Amino acid sequence: MSKLENKFTKAAYDPLDARHHGAIHVPIYQNSLFAFPSYEQFDEAMKAQQNHHIYSRGNNPTVQYLEMKLADLEEAESAKCFASGMAAISSAIMSVVSQGDHVICVNQAYGPTKEFLGSYMSRFGVETTFINGSSNEEWRSAVRPNTKLFYLESPTTLYFELQDLKHCAELAHSIGAVTIIDNTWATPCFQNPTTLGIDLVVHSITKYIGGHSDCIGGVVLGSKELVDRIANNEYMLLGGIMTPQSAALVAKGIRTLPLRMQRHEESGLYVAEHIAKLSFVTRVNHPGFSSHPQHELGRRQMSGASSLFSFLSNESTERMKDWANRLKYFKIGVSWGGFESLVTVNRHTNDDKAGNKPVAIVRLYVGIEDPRELVADIEQAWEQLKD
Ligand SMILES: *Cc1c(COP(=O)(O)O)cnc(C)c1O
């Protein structure tokens, strides 16, 4: 059984839960508090809050159901859902570091994550070194006596560079540091970092996991010990909780997550292979390509590829924006992971090892439309520009 096939039943099947009258979807527990029949039972619940429903800032049954599904899909012991990816990321980071600690973080990580570590956390005496992270040597040489956290994002989501997860986990553990990875791109369908030794996995649920561009959410996954610590501290104290309605929307999205990822992988590769041949494309950055410089590492630690990738172009960013204006199916917008294809145009800043200097980097997100129509769309928009 392939790794992805193994996820289909996990996504579709729930054991019957006697509490819900056989309801096939988990009900939305739209309430702030839970009352108790006796003071003795109330006192018992207060002693072990994570195992009981007391107050929805701590533990709501609809949210808890989603946490159980996500932990199962991600092959992690435990999960906690948050109001957004950033709430999950900032909480996970704060659960690990204290004043005077040092963090090593990939320099192409999600922008607000870098801002949180690089400027916000520095106010509290936490210092961060940013490295490219694609070579193991860079991690080794960035280590300091007070290094407490390795923060990974593999692949990164503009240049799609990878880090060696197993190596990072081993190195971090050898110096008593903790590893966190942002696994949003690969989803629990294509990469399960806890099986490679990573301590905490974070996702922006907003992207593929939610899958329908209708809600914002995040999750932290890992051992029960580490996740409980976050649940009792950052979750309860900062209060960035996921609402029961969002949890129900995401739970519906999860049913089709493996199905969607199968389609996204196929369509993403189809579109990427076709555009690689076009005159205005100088290089495609797609971890699923055999020409990707870290393709072998990707095959070792991922079982598939999602459908967000980028290409470099020698055309100016103005010209590529003009091209984007003429696309029909690719809408101009941030985020990704929904049903709809998207495009953004950025200025290329990374050094290009190939020698020539592309000036634009275009990020494409391939949705679930017919990939042949998407390729035709890309071509017709370019034809229009030439007139
Ligand atoms: C969107 C995104 C986030 C942040 O998630 P929000 O739900 O918007 O807070 C974090 N990491 C990656 C890779 C993302 O794409």
Image (cartoon, grey):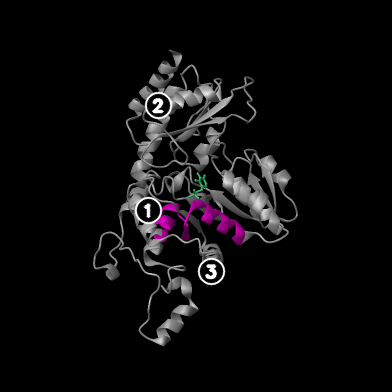
Q: Which amino acid does label 2 sit on?
A: Leu
The N terminus sits in image quarter: top left
Residue 192 versus residue 115: which sits nearer the camera? Answer: 115
> Mark 1 = which residue?
250
**Furthest-top residue in view?**
387
Instruction: Estimate the spatial distance between the alpha carbons at disc 3 and disc 2, rounded to whole Å.
Output: 48 Å
- Which sits earlier in the primary sequence, circle 3 or circle 1? 3
Mark 1 is surrounded, within 10 Å at the Cα level, by few (under 14), some (14 to 19) or many (20 or more) other residues, namely many
Instruction: Estimate the spatial distance between the alpha carbons at disc 2 and disc 1, rounded to whole Å.
Output: 30 Å
> On residue 156, which mark appears?
none
Q: Is residue 249 visible?
A: yes
Mark 3 is surrounded, within 10 Å at the Cα level, by few (under 14), some (14 to 19) or many (20 or more) other residues, namely few
Magenta residues, dominant SS class: helix
- Which sits earlier in the primary sequence, circle 3 or circle 2? 3
User: Disc 3 on helix, strand or loop?
Assistant: helix
> On residue 232, which mark appears?
3
**Furthest-left residue in view?**
22
Decide: is 294 above or below 85: above
- Which sits earlier in the primary sequence, circle 2 or circle 1? 1
Decide: is 217 above or below 244: above
User: Disc 2 on helix, strand or loop?
Assistant: loop
Is 384 left or right of 143, judged from the image as shown?
left
> Mark 2 = which residue?
327
Asked if the stretch drawn in magenta spans residue 77, the answer is: yes
The C terminus sits in image quarter: top left
